[in-house]
Amino acid sequence: MKPMDDIESWLALGLIDGLGDESIRRLLVTFGSPEAVLSAGPAELERVVKRKAAAAVGRGADPARVKAALAWLEDPLNTLMTLADPDYPSLLLHIADPPPLLYLKGRRELLGTPALAVVGSRNATPQGLSNAEAFARAASDAGLCIVSGLALGVDAAAHRGGLGGISASIAVVGTGLDIVYPARNRELAHELAQRGLLVSEFPLGTPAVGSNFPRRNRTISGISRGCLVVEAALQSGSLITARLALDQGRDVFAIPGSIHSPLSKGCHALIKQGAKLVESAGDILDELGHAPAGHASGDAAATPPAASPLLAYLGYDPTSIDILCSRSGLTPETVSAMLLPLELGGMVAALPGGYYQRLR
Protein backbone atom coordinates (compact mmCIF):
# COMPACT_ATOMS: atom_id res chain seq x y z
CA MET A 1 0.00 0.00 0.00
CA LYS A 2 1.35 3.42 -0.99
CA PRO A 3 1.70 6.16 1.65
CA MET A 4 -1.41 8.30 1.92
CA ASP A 5 0.28 11.38 0.48
CA ASP A 6 1.22 9.39 -2.63
CA ILE A 7 -2.36 8.13 -3.01
CA GLU A 8 -3.64 11.68 -2.58
CA SER A 9 -1.31 13.02 -5.27
CA TRP A 10 -2.39 10.32 -7.73
CA LEU A 11 -6.04 11.11 -7.02
CA ALA A 12 -5.40 14.83 -7.37
CA LEU A 13 -3.75 14.30 -10.76
CA GLY A 14 -6.49 11.97 -12.00
CA LEU A 15 -9.30 14.29 -10.87
CA ILE A 16 -8.12 17.39 -12.76
CA ASP A 17 -10.88 18.48 -15.12
CA GLY A 18 -9.65 18.90 -18.69
CA LEU A 19 -6.61 16.66 -18.31
CA GLY A 20 -6.87 13.52 -20.43
CA ASP A 21 -5.15 10.18 -19.96
CA GLU A 22 -2.64 10.79 -22.76
CA SER A 23 -1.54 14.07 -21.18
CA ILE A 24 -1.25 12.40 -17.77
CA ARG A 25 0.98 9.67 -19.20
CA ARG A 26 3.20 12.20 -21.00
CA LEU A 27 3.54 14.29 -17.85
CA LEU A 28 4.41 11.26 -15.75
CA VAL A 29 7.08 10.14 -18.23
CA THR A 30 8.64 13.61 -18.17
CA PHE A 31 8.38 14.48 -14.48
CA GLY A 32 8.50 11.00 -12.95
CA SER A 33 5.72 11.27 -10.34
CA PRO A 34 2.36 12.94 -9.69
CA GLU A 35 3.94 15.13 -7.00
CA ALA A 36 6.49 16.47 -9.48
CA VAL A 37 3.77 17.12 -12.07
CA LEU A 38 1.60 19.00 -9.59
CA SER A 39 4.50 21.14 -8.41
CA ALA A 40 5.78 22.01 -11.91
CA GLY A 41 5.46 25.55 -13.21
CA PRO A 42 3.42 26.60 -16.29
CA ALA A 43 6.46 26.92 -18.56
CA GLU A 44 7.69 23.45 -17.66
CA LEU A 45 4.26 21.94 -18.21
CA GLU A 46 3.78 23.64 -21.57
CA ARG A 47 6.91 21.95 -22.89
CA VAL A 48 5.08 18.64 -22.50
CA VAL A 49 1.36 19.34 -22.99
CA LYS A 50 -0.77 22.01 -24.62
CA ARG A 51 -1.38 25.29 -22.82
CA LYS A 52 -4.99 24.35 -21.98
CA ALA A 53 -3.86 21.13 -20.26
CA ALA A 54 -1.04 22.95 -18.47
CA ALA A 55 -3.53 25.52 -17.20
CA ALA A 56 -5.77 22.70 -15.92
CA VAL A 57 -2.85 21.30 -13.93
CA GLY A 58 -2.23 24.75 -12.53
CA ARG A 59 -5.83 25.00 -11.33
CA GLY A 60 -5.61 21.55 -9.76
CA ALA A 61 -8.39 19.17 -8.73
CA ASP A 62 -11.48 20.03 -6.74
CA PRO A 63 -10.43 19.39 -3.10
CA ALA A 64 -13.92 18.12 -2.27
CA ARG A 65 -13.65 15.37 -4.91
CA VAL A 66 -10.22 14.35 -3.61
CA LYS A 67 -11.57 14.25 -0.07
CA ALA A 68 -14.57 12.13 -1.16
CA ALA A 69 -12.29 9.65 -2.96
CA LEU A 70 -10.01 9.37 0.09
CA ALA A 71 -13.08 8.67 2.24
CA TRP A 72 -14.16 5.98 -0.24
CA LEU A 73 -10.74 4.35 0.06
CA GLU A 74 -11.23 3.90 3.81
CA ASP A 75 -13.47 0.90 3.02
CA PRO A 76 -11.20 -2.21 3.05
CA LEU A 77 -12.85 -3.44 -0.16
CA ASN A 78 -11.81 -0.29 -2.05
CA THR A 79 -8.32 0.38 -3.43
CA LEU A 80 -6.61 2.48 -6.06
CA MET A 81 -4.21 1.00 -8.63
CA THR A 82 -1.82 3.22 -10.59
CA LEU A 83 0.67 2.84 -13.42
CA ALA A 84 3.44 2.90 -10.81
CA ASP A 85 2.12 -0.09 -8.87
CA PRO A 86 4.07 -3.34 -9.26
CA ASP A 87 0.82 -5.31 -9.49
CA TYR A 88 -0.58 -3.22 -12.37
CA PRO A 89 -1.59 -5.91 -14.94
CA SER A 90 1.26 -6.50 -17.35
CA LEU A 91 -1.04 -7.14 -20.32
CA LEU A 92 -2.90 -3.88 -19.73
CA LEU A 93 0.31 -1.94 -19.19
CA HIS A 94 1.48 -2.79 -22.69
CA ILE A 95 -1.60 -1.68 -24.65
CA ALA A 96 -1.38 1.62 -26.52
CA ASP A 97 -3.34 3.62 -23.94
CA PRO A 98 -3.32 2.05 -20.46
CA PRO A 99 -5.48 3.84 -17.87
CA PRO A 100 -3.27 5.81 -15.44
CA LEU A 101 -5.57 5.00 -12.50
CA LEU A 102 -7.94 2.14 -11.75
CA TYR A 103 -10.51 2.27 -8.98
CA LEU A 104 -11.03 -1.24 -7.56
CA LYS A 105 -13.68 -2.79 -5.34
CA GLY A 106 -13.18 -6.38 -4.24
CA ARG A 107 -10.37 -8.89 -4.79
CA ARG A 108 -7.51 -6.82 -6.25
CA GLU A 109 -5.36 -9.94 -6.73
CA LEU A 110 -7.66 -11.17 -9.51
CA LEU A 111 -6.03 -8.66 -11.88
CA GLY A 112 -2.89 -10.77 -11.66
CA THR A 113 -4.56 -14.00 -12.84
CA PRO A 114 -5.03 -15.28 -16.42
CA ALA A 115 -8.33 -13.99 -17.77
CA LEU A 116 -10.82 -14.49 -20.61
CA ALA A 117 -13.19 -11.74 -21.76
CA VAL A 118 -16.73 -12.92 -22.51
CA VAL A 119 -19.02 -10.40 -24.22
CA GLY A 120 -22.21 -10.34 -26.26
CA SER A 121 -25.67 -8.96 -26.78
CA ARG A 122 -27.69 -7.21 -24.09
CA ASN A 123 -30.79 -8.79 -25.68
CA ALA A 124 -29.43 -12.31 -25.94
CA THR A 125 -31.55 -15.35 -26.75
CA PRO A 126 -32.09 -18.00 -24.06
CA GLN A 127 -29.52 -20.16 -25.86
CA GLY A 128 -27.04 -17.29 -25.87
CA LEU A 129 -27.45 -16.74 -22.14
CA SER A 130 -27.06 -20.45 -21.52
CA ASN A 131 -23.93 -20.59 -23.67
CA ALA A 132 -22.39 -17.53 -21.99
CA GLU A 133 -22.87 -18.91 -18.50
CA ALA A 134 -21.75 -22.44 -19.41
CA PHE A 135 -18.63 -21.37 -21.31
CA ALA A 136 -17.71 -18.92 -18.54
CA ARG A 137 -18.21 -21.53 -15.84
CA ALA A 138 -16.06 -24.08 -17.67
CA ALA A 139 -13.30 -21.54 -18.36
CA SER A 140 -13.39 -20.35 -14.74
CA ASP A 141 -13.08 -23.92 -13.48
CA ALA A 142 -10.12 -24.32 -15.84
CA GLY A 143 -8.30 -21.38 -14.23
CA LEU A 144 -9.35 -18.36 -16.32
CA CYS A 145 -10.93 -15.42 -14.52
CA ILE A 146 -13.95 -14.20 -16.52
CA VAL A 147 -13.95 -10.53 -17.53
CA SER A 148 -17.03 -8.69 -18.79
CA GLY A 149 -18.80 -5.34 -18.58
CA LEU A 150 -21.73 -5.85 -16.14
CA ALA A 151 -24.29 -5.14 -18.88
CA LEU A 152 -27.57 -6.99 -19.12
CA GLY A 153 -27.71 -10.16 -21.18
CA VAL A 154 -24.50 -11.99 -22.05
CA ASP A 155 -22.30 -9.93 -19.69
CA ALA A 156 -24.40 -10.77 -16.64
CA ALA A 157 -24.60 -14.45 -17.61
CA ALA A 158 -20.81 -14.56 -18.07
CA HIS A 159 -20.26 -13.04 -14.62
CA ARG A 160 -22.58 -15.62 -13.07
CA GLY A 161 -20.69 -18.40 -14.80
CA GLY A 162 -17.34 -17.01 -13.70
CA LEU A 163 -18.48 -16.69 -10.08
CA GLY A 164 -19.83 -20.22 -10.26
CA GLY A 165 -16.36 -21.56 -11.13
CA ILE A 166 -13.14 -21.52 -9.13
CA SER A 167 -11.54 -18.44 -10.76
CA ALA A 168 -14.27 -15.82 -10.12
CA SER A 169 -15.05 -12.84 -12.34
CA ILE A 170 -14.06 -9.21 -12.97
CA ALA A 171 -16.53 -6.53 -14.07
CA VAL A 172 -15.03 -3.51 -15.85
CA VAL A 173 -17.62 -0.74 -15.74
CA GLY A 174 -18.19 2.55 -17.53
CA THR A 175 -19.23 4.58 -14.48
CA GLY A 176 -17.73 5.52 -11.15
CA LEU A 177 -17.71 2.63 -8.69
CA ASP A 178 -20.24 4.40 -6.48
CA ILE A 179 -22.82 3.92 -9.24
CA VAL A 180 -24.29 0.58 -10.38
CA TYR A 181 -25.31 0.61 -14.04
CA PRO A 182 -27.62 -0.87 -15.06
CA ALA A 183 -29.50 -0.75 -11.75
CA ARG A 184 -31.04 -4.17 -12.48
CA ASN A 185 -27.59 -5.69 -11.93
CA ARG A 186 -27.21 -4.22 -8.43
CA GLU A 187 -27.34 -7.60 -6.69
CA LEU A 188 -24.81 -9.04 -9.14
CA ALA A 189 -22.52 -6.04 -8.60
CA HIS A 190 -22.64 -6.59 -4.83
CA GLU A 191 -21.78 -10.26 -5.32
CA LEU A 192 -18.85 -9.32 -7.56
CA ALA A 193 -17.58 -6.87 -4.93
CA GLN A 194 -17.61 -9.64 -2.32
CA ARG A 195 -16.39 -12.62 -4.35
CA GLY A 196 -14.89 -11.08 -7.50
CA LEU A 197 -13.76 -7.60 -8.52
CA LEU A 198 -15.25 -4.37 -9.87
CA VAL A 199 -12.91 -2.14 -11.90
CA SER A 200 -13.31 1.40 -13.24
CA GLU A 201 -10.93 3.98 -14.69
CA PHE A 202 -13.57 6.66 -14.08
CA PRO A 203 -13.68 8.80 -10.94
CA LEU A 204 -16.44 8.40 -8.38
CA GLY A 205 -19.67 10.05 -9.46
CA THR A 206 -19.08 9.50 -13.19
CA PRO A 207 -22.46 8.70 -14.79
CA ALA A 208 -23.19 6.26 -17.61
CA VAL A 209 -22.16 8.39 -20.61
CA GLY A 210 -22.01 6.70 -24.00
CA SER A 211 -18.42 7.71 -24.73
CA ASN A 212 -17.23 5.90 -21.59
CA PHE A 213 -18.07 2.44 -22.87
CA PRO A 214 -15.57 2.10 -25.75
CA ARG A 215 -12.89 3.11 -23.21
CA ARG A 216 -14.28 0.50 -20.84
CA ASN A 217 -14.19 -2.08 -23.63
CA ARG A 218 -10.47 -1.59 -24.34
CA THR A 219 -9.77 -2.34 -20.67
CA ILE A 220 -11.92 -5.48 -20.79
CA SER A 221 -9.86 -6.84 -23.67
CA GLY A 222 -6.64 -5.31 -22.33
CA ILE A 223 -6.56 -7.38 -19.14
CA SER A 224 -7.59 -10.59 -20.94
CA ARG A 225 -5.66 -13.19 -22.90
CA GLY A 226 -8.54 -13.69 -25.31
CA CYS A 227 -12.06 -12.47 -26.05
CA LEU A 228 -15.10 -14.70 -26.62
CA VAL A 229 -18.12 -13.21 -28.41
CA VAL A 230 -21.23 -15.25 -27.65
CA GLU A 231 -23.99 -13.44 -29.57
CA ALA A 232 -23.81 -10.11 -31.37
CA ALA A 233 -25.71 -8.20 -34.01
CA LEU A 234 -23.71 -6.52 -36.75
CA GLN A 235 -23.86 -3.15 -34.95
CA SER A 236 -23.19 -4.59 -31.48
CA GLY A 237 -20.80 -2.92 -29.07
CA SER A 238 -19.34 -6.38 -28.50
CA LEU A 239 -17.75 -6.16 -31.95
CA ILE A 240 -15.94 -3.02 -30.76
CA THR A 241 -14.45 -5.06 -27.93
CA ALA A 242 -13.47 -7.78 -30.41
CA ARG A 243 -11.76 -5.27 -32.72
CA LEU A 244 -9.92 -3.73 -29.77
CA ALA A 245 -8.82 -7.21 -28.71
CA LEU A 246 -7.42 -7.84 -32.19
CA ASP A 247 -5.61 -4.48 -32.13
CA GLN A 248 -4.07 -5.49 -28.81
CA GLY A 249 -2.89 -8.83 -30.20
CA ARG A 250 -5.42 -10.96 -28.33
CA ASP A 251 -7.12 -14.09 -29.63
CA VAL A 252 -10.76 -13.58 -30.59
CA PHE A 253 -13.28 -16.43 -30.43
CA ALA A 254 -16.89 -16.57 -31.63
CA ILE A 255 -19.73 -19.04 -31.14
CA PRO A 256 -21.63 -19.68 -34.37
CA GLY A 257 -25.43 -19.66 -34.43
CA SER A 258 -28.43 -19.88 -36.68
CA ILE A 259 -28.07 -18.28 -40.10
CA HIS A 260 -31.56 -16.82 -39.54
CA SER A 261 -30.76 -15.07 -36.25
CA PRO A 262 -29.66 -11.41 -36.37
CA LEU A 263 -27.77 -12.07 -33.13
CA SER A 264 -25.55 -14.59 -34.95
CA LYS A 265 -24.55 -12.25 -37.76
CA GLY A 266 -21.93 -10.41 -35.72
CA CYS A 267 -20.28 -13.68 -34.68
CA HIS A 268 -20.38 -15.00 -38.24
CA ALA A 269 -18.79 -11.76 -39.51
CA LEU A 270 -15.98 -12.15 -36.96
CA ILE A 271 -15.41 -15.76 -38.04
CA LYS A 272 -15.21 -14.66 -41.69
CA GLN A 273 -12.60 -12.10 -40.63
CA GLY A 274 -10.46 -14.69 -38.87
CA ALA A 275 -11.93 -15.13 -35.40
CA LYS A 276 -11.73 -18.71 -34.17
CA LEU A 277 -14.99 -20.65 -34.31
CA VAL A 278 -15.54 -22.45 -31.00
CA GLU A 279 -18.02 -25.11 -29.98
CA SER A 280 -16.75 -25.75 -26.46
CA ALA A 281 -14.63 -24.17 -23.76
CA GLY A 282 -11.99 -26.78 -24.59
CA ASP A 283 -11.51 -25.14 -28.00
CA ILE A 284 -10.59 -21.88 -26.24
CA LEU A 285 -8.26 -23.54 -23.73
CA ASP A 286 -6.47 -25.40 -26.53
CA GLU A 287 -5.99 -22.23 -28.58
CA LEU A 288 -4.66 -20.29 -25.59
CA GLY A 289 -2.44 -23.19 -24.55
CA HIS A 290 -4.03 -23.05 -21.11
CA ALA A 291 -3.99 -26.28 -19.11
CA PRO A 292 -7.09 -26.74 -16.93
CA ALA A 293 -6.59 -25.99 -13.23
CA GLY A 294 -7.81 -28.89 -11.14
CA HIS A 295 -11.03 -30.46 -12.34
CA ALA A 296 -13.22 -28.62 -14.79
CA SER A 297 -17.00 -28.74 -14.76
CA GLY A 298 -17.04 -30.38 -18.17
CA ASP A 299 -17.55 -29.33 -21.76
CA ALA A 300 -19.64 -26.18 -21.81
CA ALA A 301 -21.49 -27.26 -24.93
CA ALA A 302 -22.34 -30.75 -23.78
CA THR A 303 -25.60 -31.62 -21.98
CA PRO A 304 -27.42 -34.96 -21.82
CA PRO A 305 -29.53 -35.53 -24.92
CA ALA A 306 -33.30 -35.34 -24.47
CA ALA A 307 -35.59 -38.10 -25.67
CA SER A 308 -38.65 -36.10 -26.79
CA PRO A 309 -39.34 -36.66 -30.50
CA LEU A 310 -40.55 -33.07 -30.79
CA LEU A 311 -36.96 -31.85 -30.46
CA ALA A 312 -36.07 -33.40 -33.79
CA TYR A 313 -38.72 -31.25 -35.47
CA LEU A 314 -37.75 -28.16 -33.49
CA GLY A 315 -34.08 -28.11 -34.47
CA TYR A 316 -32.09 -25.16 -33.07
CA ASP A 317 -33.69 -22.22 -34.88
CA PRO A 318 -36.62 -20.27 -33.36
CA THR A 319 -39.73 -22.07 -34.58
CA SER A 320 -43.47 -21.41 -34.31
CA ILE A 321 -46.11 -23.93 -33.27
CA ASP A 322 -47.60 -23.78 -36.79
CA ILE A 323 -44.27 -24.85 -38.30
CA LEU A 324 -43.92 -27.63 -35.71
CA CYS A 325 -47.39 -28.87 -36.62
CA SER A 326 -46.50 -28.82 -40.32
CA ARG A 327 -43.25 -30.74 -39.75
CA SER A 328 -44.63 -33.31 -37.34
CA GLY A 329 -48.21 -33.75 -38.53
CA LEU A 330 -49.41 -33.21 -34.95
CA THR A 331 -52.24 -30.95 -33.87
CA PRO A 332 -51.53 -27.57 -32.18
CA GLU A 333 -52.98 -28.94 -28.94
CA THR A 334 -50.63 -31.91 -28.97
CA VAL A 335 -47.58 -29.78 -29.81
CA SER A 336 -48.43 -27.32 -27.02
CA ALA A 337 -48.81 -30.17 -24.55
CA MET A 338 -45.42 -31.62 -25.59
CA LEU A 339 -43.68 -28.23 -25.35
CA LEU A 340 -44.73 -27.59 -21.75
CA PRO A 341 -42.62 -30.31 -20.07
CA LEU A 342 -39.70 -29.40 -22.33
CA GLU A 343 -39.95 -25.79 -21.10
CA LEU A 344 -40.18 -26.88 -17.47
CA GLY A 345 -37.18 -29.16 -17.96
CA GLY A 346 -35.05 -26.35 -19.37
CA MET A 347 -34.72 -27.96 -22.81
CA VAL A 348 -36.87 -25.43 -24.71
CA ALA A 349 -37.42 -21.70 -24.19
CA ALA A 350 -40.44 -19.63 -25.22
CA LEU A 351 -39.55 -16.53 -27.26
CA PRO A 352 -41.57 -13.38 -28.05
CA GLY A 353 -44.02 -13.73 -30.92
CA GLY A 354 -45.06 -17.30 -30.15
CA TYR A 355 -41.74 -18.88 -31.14
CA TYR A 356 -39.81 -21.61 -29.33
CA GLN A 357 -36.12 -22.43 -29.32
CA ARG A 358 -34.28 -25.56 -28.34
CA LEU A 359 -31.58 -25.18 -25.69
CA ARG A 360 -28.57 -27.42 -26.02
Image (cartoon, grey):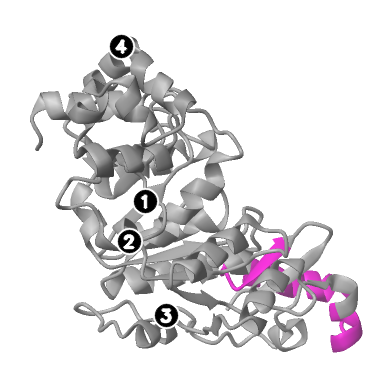
Q: Percent from the top left, x then y, of residue 27?
A: 31, 37
N-terminal of the two: label 1 or label 3?
1
Q: CA distance from mark 3 to mark 2?
A: 27 Å
Residue 98 is labelled as 1
Q: Tell me the residue at 26%/48% (across/down).
A: 195
Q: Which of 124/346 is in front?
A: 124
Dot 2: element: loop
Question: What is the crowding at mark 1: few (fewer than 14 residues within 10 Å), some, or many (at least 20)?
Answer: many
Q: Tell me the residue at 44%/67% (across/down).
A: 248
N-terminal of the two: label 4 or label 1?
4
N-terminal of the two: label 3 or label 2?
2
Q: Are marks 3 and 4 in contact (CB under 8 Å)?
A: no
Q: Tell me the residue at 30%/11% (across/down).
A: 63
Q: Are marks 4 and 1 in contact (CB under 8 Å)?
A: no
Residue at mark 3: 281
Residue 94 is labelled as 2
Q: Percent from the top left, x then y, of residue 84?
A: 19, 45
Residue at mark 4: 63
Dot 3: element: helix
- In this rendering, the answer to whether 172 lies above or below 169 is above
Q: Are marks 2 and 1 in contact (CB under 8 Å)?
A: yes
Q: Amino acid at mark 3?
A: Ala
Q: Amino acid at mark 4?
A: Pro
Q: CA distance from mark 3 to mark 4?
A: 48 Å
Q: Which residues are magenta?
A: 324-350
Q: CA distance from mark 4 to mark 1?
A: 26 Å
Q: Is residue 82 left or right of residue 43?
A: left
